[in-house]
Image (cartoon, rainbow, N blue to C red):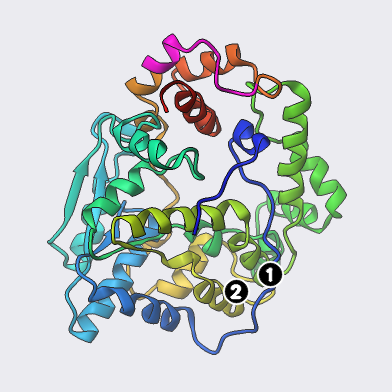
Amino acid sequence: MGLYTMEPLEIAGGWVNGYDPVPLPPDPHESPRRVLDRLLLAHLDNAPCLVAFSGGRDSSVLLAVAASLARREGLPLPVPITLSYPDAPDAEESRWQDAVLAHLDITDRIVLTVHDEHDPLGPVATRVLRQHGLIWPPNFAPTVRLLAMARGGSLLTGEGGDETFGLKRVTPLTKLVKSKGLVPPAVYADALAALTPASLRRRAALRGRYRRPWLHPEVEAELARRDAADSAAFALNAARNTWQFSTRRCARIAYETVRVLGAELNVRYIQAFAEPSLVTSVAATGGRFGWTGRAATMRALFGDLLPREVLERRTKALFANAVFTRYTKEFARTWNGSGVDTDLVNPTVLRDIWLSDDPHAPSMTLLQQAWLARYA
């Protein structure tokens, strides 16, 4: 299968909007844990079976389920593989990683140190860009590096967990119902916002939108309307909302892209929490109202596998400073503005963003487009 070709507005905005028209399947007859076991069982004996493990909730749950299943079935334990970022303090997760591995009694592990290898113009990314051109998503370098370590086997990741297990449009109402009103005042405001018509939710999304300063005003406004429409489309029904997350074009295309890249390396790539069978099972189990939040969802589904503090963790690592490194800066310093669509983009602003201390992640595709125009 060929890789997705991005449209000019998608390249300029660094995002793929919209939903694929895939109807919600009938309610499954299996629990999420049983579905997840069945998904993983097909890969645990496909050595090497690696689990991308950051120490966050989703990767920790995935590793816990896979390890429990392997022990129960007499199969080799999956091997956690971790990316370590010594130059990016905000990405430090070792305390959480060590706690989870100790709890699961797992000692075999792979740690890859990352300095500037994952830059969107680094050696990993440019090799793929030369072969395929622009692809979605642009931040594929870390996953490609993990795939290379799993040659001949499987790579399991927790991608999709935020969408499948995270907050839904109805969640504030669920909190009100299940807590009998004993919630902070902000929850009432969120619940009211969830009940407003789509037109008002679109306006609210536009007011609080993410802005892309490198775009010409009319282009930025058009993409903001698309973003707001995507946000306002979420159903009030938690089960349907869960399925909508998995049918977003940005997620489906990204999954297919990495599966293709994995196949080129003879690796089966599985986003377990994005698999339709798992998503539909979680949706059916949560029902119309779902759970009261992310932590409650994780406790309900996986509370027997990991300590409560791991399942209820609220912090996340930040990787921006570990991505845009010297390769981006060196290219930007000598870039003359060519290779991008100047009807959509202001090259001067774009160059300043790439040279800044905090480049905008959605500008990554334009960075790769400009690089390809010069070097491909």
In depth, the one of 69 and 261 nearer the eye is 261
Callout 1: SS: helix
Q: Is residue 131 above or below residue 292?
A: above
Please report contact status of discs 2 and 1: CB closer than 8 Å, yes or no: yes
Is residue 318 in sight in this rendering? no
The quarter of the displayed image where residue 293 is located: bottom right
Circle 2 residue: 283
Mark 2 to mark 1 CA distance (whole Å): 7 Å
- Horizontal side of 166 relative to 123 (left or right) equals right
Residue 306 shown left or right of residue 48 in the figure: right
Q: Which residue is mark 1?
A: 240
Count of marks overlaid on the render: 2
Residue that lies at the very extreme toward the left in this rendered image: 107
Query: Which residues are drawn in magenta?
Result: 330-341
Comparing 198 with 223, the one in front is: 223
Q: Residue furthest bottom?
A: 29
Tell me the kind of residue under disc 2. Answer: Ala
Label 1 amino acid?
Answer: Arg
Task: Tell me what residue is drawn at x 60 percent, y 74 percent.
Answer: 283
Q: Residue at x 47, y 39 (%)?
A: 138
Query: Residue 97's x, y, as percent?
Result: 25, 53
Query: Residue 170 appears at what percent x and percent y?
Result: 70, 63
Position of residue 59 measured from the top left corner of the image (x, y, whole percent): 35, 59
